[in-house]
Image (cartoon, rainbow, N blue to C red):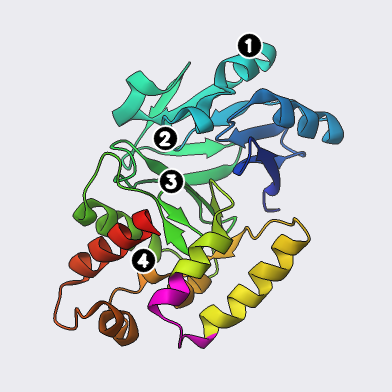
Amino acid sequence: MPRLQIEIVPCLSDNYAYLVHDPKEGVCAVVDPSEPGPVLAALDRHGLKLTHILNTHHHFDHTGGNIPLQQQFGARIVGPEKDRERIPGIDVGVGEESVWSLGSHRARILEIPAHTRGHIAFAFEDDQAVFTGDTLFALGCGRLFEGTPDMMWTSLSKLMALDDRMAVYCGHEYTLSNGRFALTLEAGNRDLRSRMAEVQLLRTKNEATIPSTIDLEKRTNPFLRPDSPEIRHTLNMAAAANVEVLAEMRRRKDAF
């Protein structure tokens, strides 16, 4: 079975929506459309009709395009059942017990709260792609607006258990800033330094640093590495629990 085709759609100042489509099956979804304009332009370029809208969480910069796109195409909106009341226009609520597919492409739903209480990820495992919204970023994680460090660590651990080869599509272009913070914690990480050189080059050309992979995040993202001896030494937390290290990193990143 051919894999889904995925196109990055920059929105607002630093958001990413994603067109996810299989032309042979006539299915096309957009993940987290913050505004309709760029999505409509991308659809027009490829001659596509939108059939589904997928939301990872309720924040307006991920759902602002829901209603206009739904009205224009009759697209069905799929989002977290546990946050149904805050997803504009939702038709289908999903959670970890759900089986949901885009055509023949099955999406495993992961409940990954902490940034918001109802946050989910869409993991198309056969297609080797996961849409993580604002829970897992390239080289970072989301702010804890509605959750706790324990919730975030549990959520990140679910994502870390995915296939290492899986491409990670997150909600924002935050990689350069995240990487600069990561280097304050683990400057001796050769993989991180190499990745940052690539990120800096991409951003000088205004190119996206997405997608990442699960493997790359596990090797370079400090929020997936609270057991790193260097990070623990930097934080003076050698004997702390992983979740305590994550909490301190998140506190420092908020002030960075």
- The local secondary structure at tag 2 comes to loop
Closer to viewer: mark 1 or mark 4? 4
Q: Which residue bears the numbered disc 4? A: 223
Residue at left offset 20%, top offset 65%? 243
- The local secondary structure at tag 3 comes to strand
Closer to viewer: mark 2 or mark 4? 4
The span from disc 1 to disc 3 (Cα, nearest Å) is: 25 Å
Q: Residue 71 carries which label?
A: 1
Q: Which residue bears the numbered disc 3? A: 121
Mark sitting earlier along the chain (3/2): 2
Name the kind of residue labelled 4 in the image: Phe
The span from disc 1 to disc 4 (Cα, nearest Å) is: 39 Å
Name the kind of residue labelled 1 in the image: Gln
The span from disc 2 to disc 1 (Cα, nearest Å) is: 20 Å
Residue 27 placed where, x, y %?
Answer: 68, 33
Q: Which residue range is magenta in the image?
A: 182-190
Q: Which residue bears the numbered disc 2? A: 57
Mark sitting earlier along the chain (4/3): 3
Name the kind of residue labelled 2 in the image: His
Residue 153 placed where, x, y %?
Answer: 27, 59
